[in-house]
Image: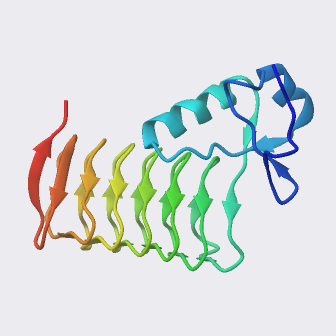
Amino acid sequence: MTNDFTAKKIDNYPILFEQETSMEYILENFDELIVAIGNNKARLDLTEKYISAGIKPAIIIHPNASVSKFATINCGTVICANTVIGPFAVLGKANVISIGGIVAHDCQFEDGVRISPNAVVAGTCIIGKNTWVCMGANIANDIRVGINSVIGAGAVVLKDIPDDVLAVGIPETIKKHYG
């Protein structure tokens, strides 16, 4: 195993690659980590692997994000610049809320959710595990989006979305079933 971080840093933070870094090395040298993988399921699976090994996933909140003091943010979650997280929103483990994303009041996000830039999830929505809301999508109030689903870029969701589908368009239509 190699641990030469000379070219594998962002600022002073080392970038570790799972294939190159032993669990023992991580346990001995770090208090927290963040899994930076775009694939929702892979990010969540690896986060849970580290939790099981006794490693604490960090919570990263950009200083230009607006996060209600009444929101709940779980481990391994990253909240990027210019995002808004409303009161009583609950974000599960290993979520990513990208630049300019909005999560309104009382939303419930399961684990492994990703919200792309400038996507909006209105109040009291439930977003299922490993779901991806692509850039610029809008989800109306009181909507449930199933697990492992994708809401396409620019879509407008006005009704509940089942598990394992791709929903696109204005208003949304189911274009693909996964699995």
Q: Quadrant of residue 63?
A: bottom right
Q: Quadrant of residue 4?
A: top right
Q: Residue 100 at x, y = what percent?
A: 49, 77
Q: Quadrant of the N terminus?
A: top right
Q: Residue 69 at x, y = what percent?
A: 64, 73
**Left/right of residue 19 with respect to residue 25 in the rendered view:** left
81 or 160: nearer the eye? 81
Q: Say which residue appears at 19% left-offset and 36% top-offset.
A: 178
Using the image, determine if residue 90 lies above or below residue 2. below
Using the image, determine if residue 100 lies above or below residue 2. below
Seen as rendered, the residue at the extreme right is 28
**Left/right of residue 35 with respect to residue 145 in the rendered view:** right
Q: Quadrant of the C terminus?
A: top left
Using the image, determine if residue 14 lies above or below residue 23. below
Q: Residue 117 at x, y = what percent?
A: 44, 70
Q: Say which residue appears at 29% left-offset and 70% top-offset.
A: 137
Q: Say which residue appears at 54% left-offset and 76% top-offset.
A: 83
Using the image, determine if residue 132 lies above or below residue 97. above
17 or 4: nearer the eye? 4
123 or 56: nearer the eye? 56
Q: Residue 107 at x, y = what percent?
A: 40, 64
Q: How is the image coloured?
A: rainbow
Q: Quadrant of residue 64?
A: bottom right
Seen as rendered, the residue at the extreme front is 7
Q: Say which residue appears at 45% left-offset and 42% top-offset.
A: 39
31 or 109: nearer the eye? 31
**Left/right of residue 174 with respect to residue 77 in the rendered view:** left
